[in-house]
Image (spheres, grey):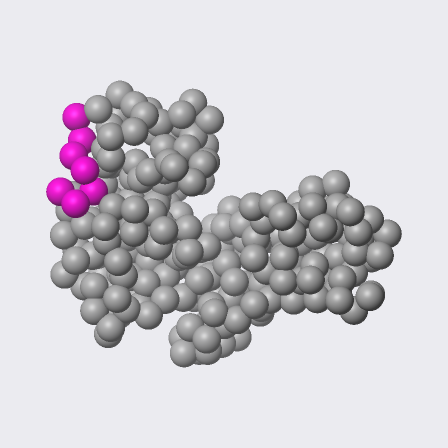
Amino acid sequence: MLIFLDTETTGLDAKDVMCSVAFVDDNTYGYSLVNEGKKISAEASSIHHITNEMIKEKQAFKKSSVYTYLQKHNTEDNILVAHNINFDLGILASTGFIWKGAIIDTLRVSKHLIQECDGFSLQFLRYELKLYRDEEKLQEQYGIKDALLAHNALSDALVTKLLLLYLKEMASEEEMQELSFKEVLLEKFSFGKHKGKYIEEVCINDSSYAQWLLGSDTDEDVKYSINYYLQGNE
């Protein structure tokens, strides 16, 4: 069974923790606000719109309905699907929950299968691939009446499901599992001062910037691509 997951956190640093989590499977869904003992930063609230007042009376993740569900289905027969899944796995691990099944990372799979895209964030792909056209139908299927909002855990889990359905036109679930562990050779930067430029070109003309990115907290596929092009130009 495929289980689509998304988490939201108290901030943007490595020390931040979960404040909401949601899943969607073939027939059901779940959503929980949780309190892991850390205040939500104003910056994080501005993204996912969860406030400290909203989680003040909530319990820890391990006492939530989503945790109960994940524990029940944490087997090798099930596949956890998320966009940038390493982030979500890390957040789950910080609570003591370790996923035992297979995984599919729709972020990395998208980079492999639709490299022509100018960006790969979930919300960019939502609009670039016109996934929003099928959102209302999917909401009706699950009986969800609330509007889909960017960076809401349940909304993002639903969009992740729509994205995987799109990607299944190009690869099987088994192939996507393999691609989730395979590094991607990117052609262009999708961020920063060289956004839209070829990575190989930047490695030649601005190698100091490329070297700086290697030492920063940058996407591992970007680092892989920089190393590839730098070695080719030595």
Pick the front one: 27 or 116: 116
**From what the image shows, is residue 21 above or below residue 110?**
above
Q: Quadrant of residue 216?
A: top right
Q: Residue at x 78, y 69 (%)?
A: 232
Q: Residue at x 69, y 62 (%)?
A: 227
Q: Position of residue 169 (x, y in %)?
A: 50, 73
Q: Is residue 64 left or right of residue 36?
A: left
Q: Is residue 21 visible?
A: yes
| Quadrant occupied by the C terminus | bottom right
**From what the image shows, is residue 118 above or below residue 225?**
above
| Quadrant occupied by the N terminus | bottom left
**From what the image shows, is residue 221 above or below residue 196?**
below
Q: How many marks?
A: 0
Pick the front one: 174 or 15: 15
Q: Position of residue 6 (x, y in %)?
A: 35, 49
Q: Residue at x 21, y 69 (%)?
A: 75
Confirm whether the magenta stretch covers residue 59. yes
Q: Is residue 149 visible?
A: no
Q: Is residue 224 left or right of residue 19?
A: right
Q: Position of residue 150 (x, y in %)?
A: 44, 40
Q: Is residue 217 left or right of residue 156?
A: right
Q: Quadrant of residue 152?
A: top left
Q: Quadrant of residue 18?
A: top left
Pick the front one: 151 or 38: 38
- Residue positioned most to the right: 205
Q: Is residue 130 left or right of residue 34?
A: right
Q: Which residues are magenta?
A: 57-63
Q: Position of residue 106 (x, y in %)?
A: 46, 61
Q: Residue at x 58, y 63 (%)?
A: 111
Confirm whether the magenta stretch covers residue 8. no
